[in-house]
Amino acid sequence: MKILLVGVGGVGEAFAVMLKDKPWAELCVLADYNLERATDIARKLGDGSRFIPEKIDASDQAAIEALVAKYGAGIIMNAVDPIFNKTIFDAAYNSGCTYLDMAMTLSSPHPTKPFEQCGEKLGDYQFSKTSQWEEKGLLAILGLGVEPGMANVFARYAQDHLFDQIEEIGIRDGANIEIKGYDFAPNFSIWTTIEECLNPPVIWEKERGWFTTAPFSEPEVFNFPAGIGPVEVVNVEHEEVLMIPRYINCKRVTFKYGLGDQFIQVLKTLHMLGLDNKDKINVKGVMVAPRDVVAACLPNPALLGEKMSGKTCAGTWIKGIKDGAEKQIYMYQVADNAECMQKWGCQAVVAQTAFSAVIALDLIQSGAWAGKGVLVPEAFPSEPFMDKMAAYGFPYQIEIM
């Protein structure tokens, strides 16, 4: 298996590190706009015949296709911010590659009722291309991180094995991660975090379909396991809500994230000042996107591992009926930062995000996951994925609530 990895930030690095001891990964091209970064990661991996750094502009479709041809890659793994998804997705199609990403193409709010109705939804562009991918016999798997990704696999497992009827599925994410030495330092891409948290969150209900609400709405306190404890979580725009109803029979789907008061206030301030804008503006003759400036001013999440402590929990809460009785469970995975740093040399949030994609490639290589078209993790059997989680260092647990 020859892989073109587009993006060697924190998640891309973790993906490559986890790939190192997998003999089925014949080649992985570490492609990044920052060639120095890609070269450093290749040096860290210490296997120059398998991990090769290349410079790439993820907005340049022709350049992506040229790298595929240069190395004979059959897989494109997209690990950059989702603003580049259309370009990379289309490059994979034109090149005849299997495509994987960890976040779907971006949404656009409804022009007049942004907090009531959906405009263009997350993934709409990619799902609209399903017939073309099927006709060409190609496979694209969208949303193969932890959330989305692992969380969606849990939903499929719950439907197949744990419930007779599912009423509601809620992805719930919380942590007690602390970062020493910074007043404010996100542990994940601030570009993506701004996009998720300030866009209108999407909710799905069987009787209404997809609709939107205000950012940070419907706060609730969720009691996370592994010593994390109670965390207030709020509605955030996220892919699972657009994915799960396509394959899982339920009545309601939500995504709620534990951001914390300080983080929410910072995001609101950025929005108030227009610093969340992803479109370029003229600043004294230089065209620059305000959001890119914010990202440049903050520490790189990939380099914060030594200053981080605590755990992060990602999981799927399911409510429904089993054997005539009401039942609620939380299927989850907890990543401890100290353990991730010791094992992978990568901080917990990015390591937890990366492992699902490596498992997916393992399953594709063995034939346990196969198909054609534009699919999501719920489209595949959950058992092979979950059977590998512990061996990959990310065991799951199920809590009866």
Image (spheres, grey):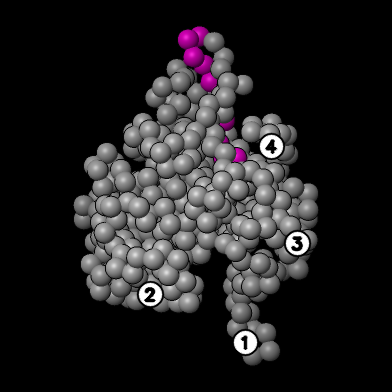
Q: Secondary structure at mark 2?
A: strand
Q: Secondary structure at mark 3?
A: loop
Classify the position of the N terminus by image quarter. bottom left
- Mark pair 1, 3: CA separation: 32 Å
> At which x and y percent is residue 160?
39, 24
The answer to whether the residue labelled 2 contacts the one labelled 3, judged by CB atoms less than 8 Å apart, is no
User: Around disc 2, counting alpha carbons within 10 Å, would you say few (fewer than 14), some (14 to 19), or many (20 or more)?
Assistant: many
Lateral position of residue 256 relative to residue 321, left or right:
right
Residue at 29 percent across and 56 percent down: it is 25
- Mark pair 2, 3: CA separation: 33 Å
**Could you tell which of marks 1 and 4 lies nearer the N-terminus?**
4
- Mark pair 1, 4: CA separation: 45 Å
The answer to whether the residue labelled 4 contacts the one labelled 2, judged by CB atoms less than 8 Å apart, is no
- Mark pair 2, 1: CA separation: 27 Å
Residue at mark 1: 286
* Callout in the foreground (2, 3): 3
Residue at mark 3: 181
Residue at mark 2: 54
109 up-or-down from 147: above or below: below
**Could you tell which of marks 3 and 4 lies nearer the N-terminus?**
3
**Could you tell which of marks 2 and 1 lies nearer the N-terminus?**
2
Q: State the extent of the magenta-drawn residues as a range.
A: 313-324
